[in-house]
Image: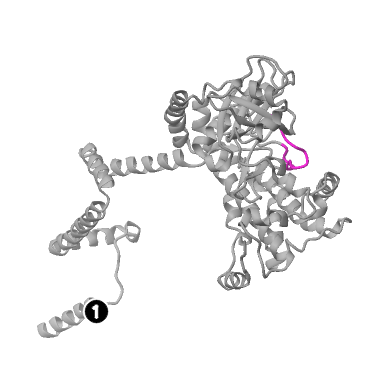
Amino acid sequence: MASSVLSSAATSLQQQNHKPTTTFFSPTRFTSHNQLCSFTTCFKRNPVKCNASLDNISENLFKNTLELDQSLSLFPVFRSGYEQFQSATAELPEMEKWGILVFAGFTWLYLTARPGVLIGAIDTYFLAPLQFGFDSLTGRRSLKMSDFLVGNRLGEGTFGVVYSGVIVPKNMNAEERVQKNGRRNASMMDGQFKQKVILKKVKIGVQGAEECGDFEEWFNYRLSRAAPETCAKFLGSFIADKTNSQFTKGGKWLVWKFEGDLDLADYMKDRNFPLNLESVMFGRVLQGMDSIERNALIIKQIMRQIVTSLKKIHDNGIVHRDIKPANLVVTKKGRIKLIDFGAAADLRIGKNFVPKLGLLDPDYCPPELYVLPEETPKPPPEPIAAFLSPILWQLNSPDLFDMYSAGIVLLQMAIPTLRSTSGLKNFNLEIKTVGYDLNKWRERTRSRPDLSILDLDSGRGWDLVTKLISERGFLRRGRLSAAAALRHPYFFLGSDQAASVISKLSLTK
């Protein structure tokens, strides 16, 4: 009898030991008081097993700690920070330590999120004063009217007039040389003045011109620190101290290093566009491709540079608000530079942002008209505005304002009939009637546009432009950002396509 009972118990125990499933401890499993008591009794009767389980947990924790220490040893800076954190929080419970770590992580993410509160603070309180001190030592903050000789007029805007010019060498009296030669431009071209510049005269007596000039100066200094490759090198400003044929006493002038006297609009006026930029953009003529493929490749190269520059200024909280061909300078080395930041807004601190006020060109303006919703309040003091800027940016995506304008530029480059003023105005009327839906416009327009360039590569160009020229959607999104546009298939080629294109290209100078 006893042997049969023992045999039965042994068989039952053996079956339990070979049970394939594992039961995890969970308070919800104890549905009755008896089950809870049963577990407690089992715990008291089998302390060895429970101690073994606790030992396993301790061993795992110790193992993980060793692995963390080994990982941190590869990064001395992080290891040092981790050790300091451990020493500073040695007396705190583990939950409080984790709470501090989570809070620190979220704080770091917030301060580094676009438009970059932390980077902005470093720029404002460290880099800007450093730049001012360096410029003062080198003389960039003390430019004078006599340092420059003004040449041909290049263009005119609402608030200023742009001229070519040169820097007068220190050992030369420019006025005497001009009087001797009798012609100012001849004097500039005789080889004695080697440092060319672009000068912008801020108009006097025009409402808003002076403020616009001050903002443009501020933004050029700001970008010279944050994204210098996006715009022409800014040399500084000066106030004319007397009146003569070129200067008016008290007038403000802004000065940039000469990088090119033609903008994208100048090139687009030529019937040979975009082939007139082929050698500028690539340094040579592309052979072995038909004209449509060559045109598409040139336009893609231009567009990539425009969007890349926009991404860089948007990452720093700046929205240009006046993107158009006339504000895109083409350098001698084939680089596209943004100019005319008089209408720009720094939405990190609210610089040059006034609700219900927009400085824009209606031909390139998106349907929302304003960079932020009209109900947006006036910016608070700069430190508070900077701290709140990530929330404002995430809710409104103000950078998408520029992306609509970039889409119009792409459409103009690809469709010849839209390069004229009348053609662009007619397009804006038509696109408005179809709710800014390019696909509907394509079906209904009477202008019969040539879309062959945008339809290449299975219509990648057309797909990109439809996602730029559109209404804002949910949460004021629905249009591609600069970062998203750069990831669009339009800017990429598959490996087989890339190989095919490379095999076709025979590059000759």
Q: Residues within 10 Å of mark 1 (few under 14, many from 20)?
A: few
Q: Nearer the viewer, residue 439 or 500?
A: 500
Q: Nearer the viewer, residue 240 or 156?
A: 240
Regarding residue 30, the answer to whether it shows in the image is: yes
Q: Vertically, is 10 above or below 427?
A: below
Residue in the picture at 59% in, 66% down: 493
Q: Residue furthest left?
A: 2
Q: Is residue 359 magenta?
A: yes
Residue in the picture at 74% in, 21% down: 206
Q: Quadrant of the N terminus?
A: bottom left
Can you give x and y, in whole percent of width and height, for residue 411 in the image? 74, 53
The stretch of residues the image draws in magenta is 356-369
Q: Nearer the viewer, residue 200 or 166?
A: 166
Side of 336 where 245 appears, left or right? right
Q: Magenta region's main secondary structure?
A: loop
Residue beneath label 1, please? 18
Can you give x and y, in whole percent of width and height, for residue 288 in the image? 67, 70
Q: Is residue 106 magenta?
A: no
